[in-house]
């Protein structure tokens, strides 16, 4: 018996046109979803940055309660910055105990080492170094609390000071103390009297308008066995209102020009150098002819997210001194009452400047 004819079995499949349509649809969906995913991630990073800012602001206020004053901004000609002083209040007392704030006839504790330098581990453990150079070990320790998650710079970066001393793996930061509402240059070297007598040139910030300043010129934590204090201003001086005065702000380091060890030192002349912000302290603040207060301090006299210009340009000093971020359209700031605000870079310049002064009598409400 003859079997009936059956056509050969064919498996169902997409035609080329159908496949291309599906690919186009998937591509369109991915294109629509990707910005939403990126926006969600940025919102999470921004929230983490705000949490960092809150923690640091509260730490500074707790320091004030314990020491009866805000931390000094920078110990010029010695090297300490306010970041070191608040370590015990951000649960980093172990690092704080390793630091020695001293450079006088009784001891010379350094924040860097002559090029090509030594590792932080050697500075801490080698008997030839650990007495005078253990601060270098601390300078190499990144802290997540002091870094914005949106930033992309490395955790550790080689840094050679203007004095040609180096920290091989220095830890950057995103958070600066607000020192002024009027200066657009981070060098202010003047001849001033020292508390222990005599006079010499130093970076002078005690008379500036910000909250994170110094109490007197040549302020040192100790000098030749005598204490001169860790504090700068007091909260009573914030007469413009703690809820409308910036305490700290977010800043984005520009570390693209990373020096080769022993080759490129930083030029800290006005309008030169690089926009570098560091934790703990450093050799440029230590070195008597450098200063570079923007390593730890910022100014509201410069617009938020100031446009990048190359070193040597007329506006480079202002760019160094500016607050800003990698968040779209603004940056995060901690106020002197411990609250946190995201301030848009479109803010009126006069209003923004007024937020950086503690007692100039301006009425400036922070945007919600």
Image (tube, helix red, strand yellow):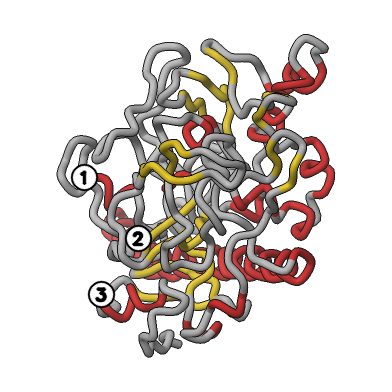
Tell me the CA gap for discs 1 and 2: 38 Å
Q: Which residue is mark 2?
A: 27
Task: Answer above or below: position of 208 versus 357.
Answer: above
Q: Nearer the viewer, mark 3 or mark 1?
A: 3
User: Which residue is disc 3 drawn over?
Assistant: 349
Which one is closest to the eye, mark 3 or mark 2?
3
Disc 1 secondary structure class = loop
The answer to whether residue 46 is left or right of residue 321 is right
Residue count near mark 1 (Cα–Cα under 10 Å), binned few <14, some 14–19, many ≥20? some
Asked if the residue under mark 1 is in contact with the one under mark 3, i.e. CB atoms within 8 Å, the reply is no
Quadrant (top left, top right, bottom left, bottom right) of the N terminus: bottom right
3D distance between C-alphas at marks 3 and 2: 43 Å
* Quadrant showing the C terminus: bottom left
Q: Is residue 14 left or right of residue 287?
A: left
Asked whether residue 25 is in view, the answer is no
Q: Residue at x 47, y 15 (%)?
A: 261
Identify the mark at residue 309; answer none if there is no mark.
1
Q: Is residue 69 left or right of residue 28?
A: right
Identify which residue is drawn at 43% across, 45% down: 192
Q: Quadrant of residue 329?
A: bottom left
Distance in Å between CA atoms under marks 3 and 1: 20 Å
Circle nearer the N terminus (1, 2): 2
User: Label 3 crowding class (10 Å Cα cut-off): few <14, some 14-19, many 20+?
Assistant: some
SS at circle 2 = helix
Secondary structure type for disc 3: helix
Circle 2 crowding by C-alpha within 10 Å: few under 14, some 14–19, many from 20: few
Q: Residue at x 56, y 64 (%)?
A: 49
Residue 276 x/y as whole percent: 43, 41
**Residue 273 image offset from top left, x and y in percent:** 32, 34
Up/down of 315 relative to 265, above or below: below
Residue at screen point 63% across, 77% down: 338
């Amino acid at each position: 018996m003859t079997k009936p004819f059956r056509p050969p079995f064919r498996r169902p499949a997409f035609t080329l046109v159908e496949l291309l349509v599906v690919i186009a649809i998937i591509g369109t969906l991915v294109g629509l979803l990707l910005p939403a995913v990126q926006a969600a991630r940025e919102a999470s990073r921004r929230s983490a940055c705000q949490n960092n800012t809150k923690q640091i602001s509260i730490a500074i206020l707790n320091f004030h309660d314990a020491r009866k004053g805000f931390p000094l901004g920078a110990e010029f000609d010695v090297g300490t910055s306010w970041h070191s002083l608040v370590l015990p209040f951000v649960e980093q007392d172990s690092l704080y105990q390793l630091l020695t704030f001293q450079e006088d006839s009784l001891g010379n504790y350094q924040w860097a080492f002559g090029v090509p330098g030594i590792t932080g581990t050697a500075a801490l453990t080698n008997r030839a170094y650990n007495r005078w150079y253990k601060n270098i070990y601390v300078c190499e320790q990144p802290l997540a609390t002091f870094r914005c998650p949106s930033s992309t710079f490395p955790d550790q970066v080689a840094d050679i000071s203007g004095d040609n001393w180096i920290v091989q793996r220095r830890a950057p930061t995103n958070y600066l103390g607000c020192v002024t509402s009027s200066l657009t240059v981070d060098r202010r070297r003047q001849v001033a009297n020292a508390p222990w007598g005599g006079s010499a040139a130093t970076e002078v910030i005690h008379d500036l308008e910000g909250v994170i300043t110094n109490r007197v010129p040549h302020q040192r934590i100790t000098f030749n066995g005598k204490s001169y204090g860790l504090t700068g201003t007091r909260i009573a001086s914030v007469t413009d209102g703690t809820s409308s005065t910036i305490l700290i702000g977010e800043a984005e380091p520009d570390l693209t020009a990373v020096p080769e060890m022993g080759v490129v030192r930083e030029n800290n002349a006005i309008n030169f150098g690089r926009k570098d912000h560091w934790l703990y302290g450093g050799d440029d603040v230590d070195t008597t002819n450098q200063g570079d207060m923007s390593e730890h301090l910022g100014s509201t006299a410069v617009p938020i997210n100031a446009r990048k210009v190359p070193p040597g340009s007329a506006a480079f000093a202002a760019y160094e001194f500016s607050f800003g971020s990698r968040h779209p359209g603004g940056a995060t700031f901690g106020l002197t009452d411990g609250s946190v605000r995201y301030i848009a870079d479109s803010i009126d310049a006069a209003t923004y400047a007024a937020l950086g002064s503690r007692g100039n009598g301006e009425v400036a409400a922070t945007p919600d």
